[in-house]
Image (spheres, grey):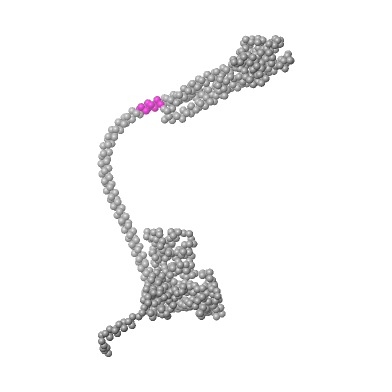
Amino acid sequence: MIWCGCPHQLKNMSIRGLKKKQPKTFKVRIITVDAEMEFSCEMKWKGKDLFDLVCRALGLRETWFFGLQYTIKGMCTWLKMDKKVLDQEIPKEDPISFHFLAKFYPEKVEEELLQEITQHLFFLQVKKQILDEEIYCSPEATVLLASYAVQAKYGDYDPNFHEPGFLAHDELLPKRVLRQYQLTAEMWEEKITAWYAEHRGIARDEAEMNYLKIAQDLEMYGVNYFPIAQNKNHTDLLLGVDAKGIHIYSINNRFSPNKSFEWSSIRNISCSEKELTIKPLDKKAEVFKFFSSQLKVNKLIFQLCIGNHDLFMRRRKVDSIEIQQMKAQAREEKARKKMENQRLAREKQLREEAERAKEELERRLFQLEDEARQANEALLRSQEAAELLAEKAQIAEEEAKLLAQNAAEAEQERQRLEITALKSKEEKRLMEQKMREAELIAVKLVKESDRRAKEAEHLKQDLHEAREAERKAKQKLLDITRLNYPHMAKYPQYSPGDSRDANFDKGSIKLDLKDIDLKRLSFEIERERLDYLENSRKFEDRLKELKSEIHALKLEEKQAGLYSHWNEVLGSLDRSLGSAPSWMKTLETGDAVDVNLQRPFPAYLLNTASSWPCTNKIQHMVPVEKSSSQANSLAANSVGTGTRKQIIKVQQHDSDVIYI
């Protein structure tokens, strides 16, 4: 058939045909865990058409685990596959946003997740749920999981490349764990790095699979929670749906279910408005009914139950051809990756060995260059040293001449020092002789002091005997006075002109002091004192001479080590002088040894001396400035009190009798 018509009509018909062929579209933004994509969808597309487009773009074949999620009126729901996209209650926005997430979870990740992209998407989603605290994990397990996440992202640990602080911008631990322990970011990084260093040699897919193996054993892994109630008025329970069945939890405990219904023990699940009914396979068992807050929540629970049950039944059936092919491809891919990893490991090892050999060669080359440089420098130094040696040889000759001259001078100096040493030895000998003489003098003085001390003791004893004899003579004289002149006993003091004095018997008043010769004692004490003072002056003169000689030689003998010895000698001499008896020191002061000799006799006896015989040989020493009457009064007072002192000098009589 041939079409005939004008060109203008043909043009209008072609434009209308093009307009009819171009369908209307709307934009969609698909958000995965780690990326975003935009697609143009036809108005008539169903949810499955959009889902298949996303799976093809991702290269995902295990599509039964995933779905497209969106949020409407604060509730998360899933896009239905059998209804048109625009006919569903989706957000009114341009572009329309959907989240591509895992809707159902496998029971055993290692057996069911075949593709690497599937493992990666599950790894990213589970990691995000743990960090957002949607899945509870203990602090120790979070550190281990973080180390596997670091291994998957950064590869093997290299201390030269992974320096402290390389994890500062990575979110690896939940905030709950960070708040629970008072540790700094550096401390957490150190703990994670300690585990991370042990994962050396693990590939990225292996690290992600190890992460999922640990995560699937957590209590809240893969569970979707919904608030429910056993009556219409109260919401006091939680219903959880996962790959193993349906679980009933208390409102405050999401870890241990109060009751569980495994998929193999459920006969039927029915949904009517807000009520859901779970009928166990055992007809005798109790039927569990519960209510949810909204009809949409009931439908969502029902969809999750159907999807998880279908996957549960599929796992227990024979794998389809597609699944078998995928598993075979997965095995081949794993074997290929394993061989490739081994080859890469060998190449890496060979490269490291080659780098080490290269470094060793470079080090050896640098060492040889350094040795050559040192040899050249040594050669130059040897040439310079030869020149210096020639100069030194000439200088050495001149120095030898100077040394010979110095040797001669040194010999002369040595001879002079020997002469000086001989002189110093002679002086030292003389000083030692003088020291010995001084020591002998000191010893003699000490002996003399001891002898004088003994003599002083004897004199003291004789003086004591004289006092006793004096006391007896006084007593005898008083007794005679009382017998002959009883009236004078009342008046012991009387004038010397009394006529009764002439009646005294000269023989009765005569006092025999032969045993207590006071004059002899006084003369001996005076003589001893003078002798001691004379000897002391001589010794002091000799001691001063020795001190002056020692001080004159101190400076000369200081270097010979005799300085301390002279000090000891001077100290010993001072000590020997200080060891003199106290009575001699008393004599040195010039005090008279009057003791009891200064005690006066009775005044009436002194006043009768003119009538006694030999009075011209007795001298009474009284103070010059006092008159005779004053002396008499002093004598009279001394009889009564015995406190005043009068010095009397006595001359010896021709006989041993002293008249007073």
Q: Is residue 423 magenta?
A: yes
> In this image, 155 relative to 271: left or right?
left
Q: Is residue 334 above or below residue 608?
A: below
Of the pair 114 and 36, the residue shown nearer to us: 36
**Residue 88 in view here:** yes
Say which of 79 and 531 sits in front: 79
Farthest residue toward the front?
8
Q: Nearer the viewer, residue 313 or 331?
A: 313
Q: Which residues are magenta?
A: 415-424
Residue 116: x %, y % from top left: 39, 71
Give the quarter of the figure containing the C terminus. Answer: top right
Q: Quadrant of residue 411?
A: top left
* Residue at image location 45% in from the left, 74% down from the top: 72
Asked which quadrant contains residue 418, the reply is top left
Counting every numbered tag in the picture gives 0
| Residue drawn at x 37%, y 72% as measured from the top left | 37
Please say if 592 is above or below 176.
above
Coordinates of residue 38 in the picture (x, y in percent):
37, 73
Quarter occupied by residue 387: top left
Q: Is residue 325 left or right of residue 386?
A: right
Residue 638 percent across, percent down from the top left: 65, 19
Q: Do we see residue 104 in this rendering?
A: no
Q: Quick one: which residue is furthest to the bottom in this view?
A: 1
